[in-house]
Amino acid sequence: MAGSYLTFGLDQLQQKYAAAQSPYNEFLRRRGMSVGLYNLPVGAEDKQTPHMADEVYFVVAGRGRLRVVDEEIEVKAGDIISVDHGEDHQFSNVTEDLQMIVVFAPPDLPDEE
Protein backbone atom coordinates (compact mmCIF):
# COMPACT_ATOMS: atom_id res chain seq x y z
CA MET A 1 0.00 0.00 0.00
CA ALA A 2 2.32 2.74 -1.16
CA GLY A 3 1.36 6.15 0.17
CA SER A 4 -0.56 4.96 3.24
CA TYR A 5 2.16 5.89 5.73
CA LEU A 6 5.03 8.31 6.29
CA THR A 7 8.17 7.94 8.36
CA PHE A 8 10.28 10.66 9.92
CA GLY A 9 13.76 10.48 11.40
CA LEU A 10 14.33 12.70 14.41
CA ASP A 11 17.87 13.46 13.20
CA GLN A 12 16.56 14.64 9.81
CA LEU A 13 13.86 16.78 11.44
CA GLN A 14 16.44 18.35 13.77
CA GLN A 15 18.66 19.21 10.80
CA LYS A 16 15.77 20.52 8.73
CA TYR A 17 14.59 22.93 11.43
CA ALA A 18 17.96 23.79 13.04
CA ALA A 19 17.96 27.30 11.56
CA ALA A 20 14.19 27.87 11.69
CA GLN A 21 12.98 31.25 12.95
CA SER A 22 9.99 29.76 14.77
CA PRO A 23 10.39 27.45 17.78
CA TYR A 24 7.47 25.29 16.51
CA ASN A 25 7.63 23.62 13.10
CA GLU A 26 4.81 21.39 11.92
CA PHE A 27 5.99 18.43 9.86
CA LEU A 28 2.76 16.43 9.52
CA ARG A 29 -0.87 17.45 9.14
CA ARG A 30 -3.83 15.15 8.80
CA ARG A 31 -7.55 15.82 9.11
CA GLY A 32 -7.63 14.70 12.75
CA MET A 33 -4.20 15.80 13.99
CA SER A 34 -1.00 17.69 13.36
CA VAL A 35 2.51 16.91 14.58
CA GLY A 36 5.44 19.27 14.98
CA LEU A 37 8.85 19.74 16.52
CA TYR A 38 9.01 22.35 19.32
CA ASN A 39 12.42 23.66 20.41
CA LEU A 40 13.05 25.93 23.38
CA PRO A 41 16.71 26.76 24.11
CA VAL A 42 18.01 27.47 27.61
CA GLY A 43 16.49 30.71 28.87
CA ALA A 44 13.85 30.88 26.11
CA GLU A 45 10.53 32.62 26.69
CA ASP A 46 7.60 30.40 25.73
CA LYS A 47 5.05 32.73 24.13
CA GLN A 48 2.30 30.23 23.35
CA THR A 49 -1.32 30.93 24.22
CA PRO A 50 -4.15 28.43 24.85
CA HIS A 51 -5.02 26.26 21.85
CA MET A 52 -8.36 25.13 20.46
CA ALA A 53 -7.05 21.55 20.29
CA ASP A 54 -5.94 18.99 22.84
CA GLU A 55 -2.20 18.41 22.69
CA VAL A 56 0.43 15.94 23.77
CA TYR A 57 4.09 16.83 24.36
CA PHE A 58 6.72 14.11 24.12
CA VAL A 59 9.95 15.51 25.57
CA VAL A 60 12.79 14.19 23.43
CA ALA A 61 15.60 16.10 25.16
CA GLY A 62 16.19 18.75 27.77
CA ARG A 63 14.82 19.91 31.06
CA GLY A 64 12.54 22.71 32.26
CA ARG A 65 9.21 23.43 33.88
CA LEU A 66 5.67 23.53 32.53
CA ARG A 67 2.94 25.63 34.10
CA VAL A 68 -0.61 24.51 33.36
CA VAL A 69 -3.15 26.97 34.79
CA ASP A 70 -2.00 27.24 38.44
CA GLU A 71 0.17 24.11 38.64
CA GLU A 72 3.83 23.79 37.71
CA ILE A 73 5.67 20.55 36.98
CA GLU A 74 9.22 19.61 36.06
CA VAL A 75 9.64 18.15 32.58
CA LYS A 76 12.58 16.16 31.25
CA ALA A 77 13.53 13.85 28.41
CA GLY A 78 11.19 10.87 28.24
CA ASP A 79 8.18 12.67 29.74
CA ILE A 80 4.82 12.67 27.96
CA ILE A 81 2.39 15.41 28.96
CA SER A 82 -1.19 15.94 27.79
CA VAL A 83 -2.76 19.41 27.99
CA ASP A 84 -6.49 19.88 27.41
CA HIS A 85 -7.68 22.38 24.82
CA GLY A 86 -8.24 25.91 26.10
CA GLU A 87 -5.94 25.54 29.13
CA ASP A 88 -3.34 28.24 29.74
CA HIS A 89 0.15 26.68 29.71
CA GLN A 90 3.75 27.73 29.17
CA PHE A 91 7.22 26.30 29.57
CA SER A 92 9.70 28.15 31.79
CA ASN A 93 13.03 27.73 33.57
CA VAL A 94 14.53 25.86 30.62
CA THR A 95 17.82 24.64 32.10
CA GLU A 96 18.69 22.26 29.23
CA ASP A 97 17.53 22.89 25.64
CA LEU A 98 14.02 21.44 25.40
CA GLN A 99 13.11 19.54 22.28
CA MET A 100 9.60 18.14 22.02
CA ILE A 101 7.37 16.40 19.55
CA VAL A 102 3.90 17.93 19.83
CA VAL A 103 0.66 16.33 18.64
CA PHE A 104 -2.46 18.51 18.24
CA ALA A 105 -5.78 16.71 17.85
CA PRO A 106 -7.58 17.99 15.92
CA PRO A 107 -5.09 20.31 14.20
CA ASP A 108 -4.95 23.66 16.00
CA LEU A 109 -5.20 25.66 12.78
CA PRO A 110 -7.85 24.95 10.12
CA ASP A 111 -6.85 22.54 7.37
CA GLU A 112 -5.67 24.41 4.32
CA GLU A 113 -6.29 21.47 1.99
Image: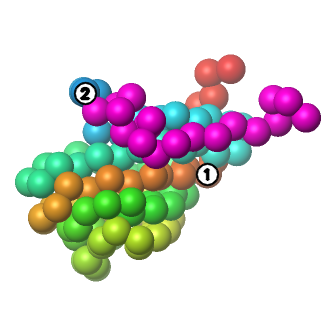
Residue toward you, 101 or 88: 101
Q: Which mark is residue 19?
A: 2
Tell me, yes or no, if residue 103 can be seen here: yes
* Image coordinates for residue 73, horizontal then vertical, percent: 28, 78
Q: Which image quarter: residue 107?
A: top right
The residue carrying mark 1 is 105
Residue 10 is tagged as none
Report whether residue 49 is seen.
no
Q: Earlier in the sequence, mark 2 or mark 1?
A: 2
Query: Range of the magenta residues?
Result: 1-18
On the image, the x and y values in percent for residue 7 come to: 64, 40
Magenta stretch, overall SS? loop
- The residue lying at 35 percent from left, 33 percent from top is 15
Taking the image as shown, residue 72 lies to the left or right of residue 55, namely: left
The residue furthest left is 43
Q: Position of residue 55 (x, y in %)?
A: 51, 57
Asked if the magenta segment contains residue 5, the reply would be: yes
Looking at the image, residue 100 sits to the left or right of residue 93; the answer is: right
